[in-house]
C-alpha cells in the first residue's frame, strides 16, 4: 500500500487541477479542457504510476467513451474528470487493462462523480450567499475568502481527497473482485470495455455527421487505416486535405454567385447614363 501513496496523491491533485473551477492552469483553458480530458489524464496518471504506455492506452479507451460527452446548463450525465482520474488510476493500480479502466470510469463518473459534482454546486451556493452578504457590507476580506479561498478548499476536498482514497484503499477491493468473481463476469467486463469506446465514437458521429453522404469519408478513413496500413499521422494530413477540398467545393457556388452579382453591379454603374433619365 505504501507504494500507492505518492501515485494516488498525485492523481488526486491532477483531478483537482482538471476541475472546471480550478484557476491554476489558465482557468478552463489549461485545466478543464486540457488536464481534465481523459487522454491527458492517462498521460499524467501514467507518469504518476511510472507506466506511461499503460496510462496512455487507458486514457485513449476512456477518451473514446466520453468523446461526445456534453454538459448543458451545468447538467451532465457523467462527471468526466472523476471518471478519467478515478477509472484510469484504479486500472493502473490493479490490472492496467484499458477495458477495466473504461468500466471503472463509467461506473465512477455516473455514480460517485455526479454525487460529488452536485454536492460541490450545493456548497458553492452557500459560499456565494456569504460573498454577497460580505459585498453588501463592504467586507473585502469576506469577499475574497468566500469567493476565492473557501470554494477552492471545497473543490480540493471534493476532488483530490475522494480520488486519493479510492485509489489508495480501493485498489485492493478491485483486485479482490477481479480475482474472485467468476470468469464469465470478467469476460463480460472486457467485452463491455471494448464496446463502450465504439459507442462513444457513434455518439460523436451522430453529432458531427449532418447528412448520410458524409459517411463516405468515415468509411474511407476506416479502410485506409485498417487495410492500407497508413499511420494515424498520415491519415490526419489526408483528412485535413479532403476537408479543405470539400469545404472549397461546397462554398464555391456561393462565392461565384457573389462575384457575378458584384460584376453585374459594377457593369451597370459603368454603362449608366444620367442624361437618359
Image (spheres, grey):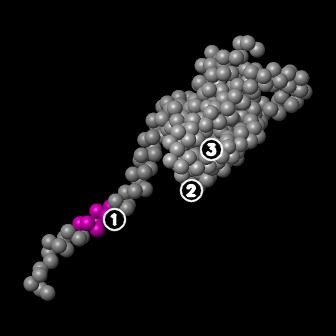
Magenta run includes residue 40:
no
Residue closest to the far top: 2
Dot 2 and dot 1 residues touching (CB under 8 Å): no
Residue 159 image label: none
Whole-percent x, y for residue 219 in the image: 59, 43
Counting residues from the N terminus, which is met first, the one under dot 1 or under dot 3?
3
Residue depicted at x 28% and y 62% = 259
Residue depicted at x 78% and y 30% = 190
Residue closest to the far bottom: 277
**Alpha-carbon neighbours of circle 1 within 10 Å: few (<14), some, or many (≥20)?**
few
Magenta run includes residue 260:
yes
Q: Secondary structure at mark 3?
A: helix
**Alpha-carbon neighbours of circle 3 within 10 Å: few (<14), some, or many (≥20)?**
many
Q: Which residue is mark 2?
A: 211
Q: Secondary structure at mark 1?
A: helix
Up-down: is 170 above or below 135? above
Whole-percent x, y for residue 34 in the image: 54, 34
Counting residues from the N terminus, which is met first, the one under dot 3 or under dot 2?
3
Q: Nearer the viewer, mark 1 or mark 3?
A: 3
Q: Nearer the viewer, residue 210 or 144?
A: 144
Q: Which residues, given as a range, are shown in magenta?
A: 256-263
As measured in the structure, the alpha-carbon distance from the residue carrying label 3 to the one carrying label 2 is: 47 Å
Q: Which residue is mark 1?
A: 257
Q: Tag count in the figure?
A: 3
Residue depicted at x 61% and y 46% = 130
| Residue 224 seen anywhere in this rendered image of the structure | no
Quarter of the image with the C terminus is bottom left
Q: Which residue is mark 3?
A: 127
Q: Give the image quarter of residue 265.
A: bottom left
**Alpha-carbon neighbours of circle 2 within 10 Å: few (<14), some, or many (≥20)?**
few
Amino acid at each position: 500500500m505504501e507504494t500507492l501513496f505518492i501515485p494516488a496523491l498525485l492523481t488526486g491533485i491532477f483531478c483537482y487541477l482538471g476541475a472546471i473551477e480550478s484557476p491554476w492552469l489558465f482557468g478552463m483553458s489549461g485545466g478543464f479542457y486540457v488536464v481534465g480530458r481523459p487522454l491527458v489524464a492517462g498521460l499524467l496518471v501514467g507518469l504518476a504510476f511510472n507506466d506511461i504506455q499503460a496510462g496512455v492506452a487507458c486514457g485513449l479507451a476512456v477518451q473514446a467513451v466520453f468523446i461526445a460527452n456534453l454538459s448543458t446548463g451545468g447538467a451532465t450525465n457523467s462527471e468526466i474528470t472523476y471518471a478519467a482520474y478515478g477509472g484510469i488510476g484504479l486500472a493502473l493500480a490493479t490490472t492496467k487493462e484499458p477495458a477495466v479502466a473504461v468500466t471503472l470510469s463509467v461506473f465512477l463518473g455516473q455514480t460517485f462523480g455526479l454525487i460529488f459534482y452536485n454536492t460541490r454546486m450545493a456548497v458553492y451556493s452557500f459560499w456565494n450567499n456569504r460573498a454577497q452578504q460580505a459585498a453588501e457590507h463592504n467586507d473585502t476580506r469576506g469577499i475574497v475568502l468566500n469567493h476565492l479561498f473557501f470554494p477552492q478548499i471545497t473543490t480540493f476536498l471534493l476532488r483530490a481527497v475522494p480520488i486519493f482514497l479510492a485509489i489508495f484503499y480501493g485498489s485492493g477491493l478491485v483486485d479482490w473482485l477481479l480475482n474472485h468473481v467468476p470468469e464469465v463476469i470478467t469476460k463480460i467486463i472486457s467485452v463491455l470495455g471494448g464496446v463502450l469506446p465504439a459507442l462513444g465514437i457513434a455518439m460523436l458521429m451522430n453529432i458531427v455527421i449532418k447528412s448520410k453522404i458524409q459517411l463516405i469519408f468515415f468509411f474511407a478513413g476506416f479502410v485506409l487505416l485498417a487495410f492500407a496500413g497508413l499511420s494515424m499521422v498520415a491519415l490526419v494530413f489526408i483528412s485535413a486535405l479532403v476537408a479543405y477540398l470539400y469545404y472549397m467545393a461546397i462554398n464555391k457556388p456561393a462565392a461565384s454567385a457573389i462575384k457575378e452579382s458584384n460584376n453585374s453591379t459594377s457593369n451597370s454603374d459603368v454603362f449608366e447614363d444620367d442624361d437618359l433619365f
